[in-house]
Image (cartoon, rainbow, N blue to C red):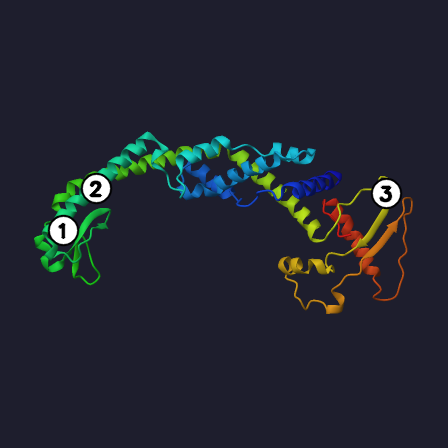
Amino acid sequence: MRDLLAETSEAWEFRARNGRLPLAGVEEISPLLEALRESGGAAAPEDFRPVLAVARAAEAVRRALAKADSPGLIRRREAIPSFVALLGRARKLFAADGSVQDEASPQLRDVRGKLRRRRAEVSRSLGRIVDQRRDFLGDAVVVLRNDRYCLPVMASARARVPGIVHDRSGSGQTVFVEPIEVIESNNELALLAAEERREVENLLAQFGREVLAASADLEEAVEQIAALDALEARVEFGELTAGRVPELSADGGWALSKARHPLLDSALEPLRRRVLGESREARPARARDVVPLDLELPAGKRLLVISGPNAGGKTVVLKTAGLFSLMAQAGLPLPC
């Protein structure tokens, strides 16, 4: 309990000097890691987004906590693994939009260069055919059908554009023909596209295995960031209630001053509505403002008698004392 309260005090002071910790963006990664284990590391580029979010958050928190000079927060920082190497590999592999970039490997750069050149050649060839046979085309555009570059030809003029028919329009008025002049080029494009897919899959599988090698560190980072998130929540609760981190008495005495039960404190009404679904009409207006209470049980005293009229607040005193005891054990600031 003392350690939790000390950590709360440290985090409160750190936040006052440096602001909030950059904890946003962390997601549950256990399902992804399990899927990677089953596939041997194979995954789609977007599947790695949660892992990279955890790694980036961990590095951001480590940098933020480098300003900490208190023992508890220093221990928290040291417990967060570093992911500099993994993130460096990710920057080389993924583009800003999450796709695998050309520079991920020399082989990928080479095959994509060939793909671009071959597509340009096919586009020029089809452009010439469009110019020559425009009268037979349903539209002067190049379309993809079954991953093959085709031209939309009027069904009545099908024989005027020799080639392979890959599809027809819903109305039946247009057929999509792969002209005979570009069949071989389309074949080369298909081979290059297959080579590109194999290289991308190989690169992603390699990165997936790197992620698996760091899986224990990633799961530890999630736990540590979750613990820091809970710590920040304790601090935020203290700020919302204008509370105090309790000081533990060495002699066992009890003293509360201006204590406010959290379920009665009007300052926490917006939070209760959000978290507990409390209605604005849950209590009559006259009952919304809590009356702060003072409670003292000196050291050496084991019994305290509380007396008073009905609805005088006896139960609230007992509940406040019991709840504050549990809150202190959880490291929470007390609204008092």
Which amino acid type is marked by label 3?
Gly
Which amino acid type is marked by label 2?
Ala
Q: Residue 120 bears which disc, if any?
A: 2
Give the residue drawn at x 54%, y 32%. 82
Please tell me in which quadrant of the rendered image residue 5 appears: top right
Q: Residue 130 bears which disc, if any?
A: 1
Give the residue drawn at x 50%, y 32%. 84
Q: Position of residue 202 (x, y in %)?
A: 36, 34
Q: Residue 252 bears which disc, if any?
A: 3
Query: Is residue 209 left or right of 10 when viewed as pictured?
Result: left
Tell me which label, 3 or 2, sits earlier in the chain: 2
Q: Position of residue 77 (x, y in %)?
A: 61, 34
Task: Measure how far apart labels 1 and 2 are at the Cα level.
Answer: 15 Å
Which amino acid type is marked by label 1?
Val
Query: Is residue 58 left or right of 165 when viewed as pictured?
Result: right
Q: Residues within 10 Å of mark 3 (few under 14, many from 20)?
A: few
Give the residue drawn at x 32%, y 34%. 199
Tell me which label, 3 or 1, sits earlier in the chain: 1
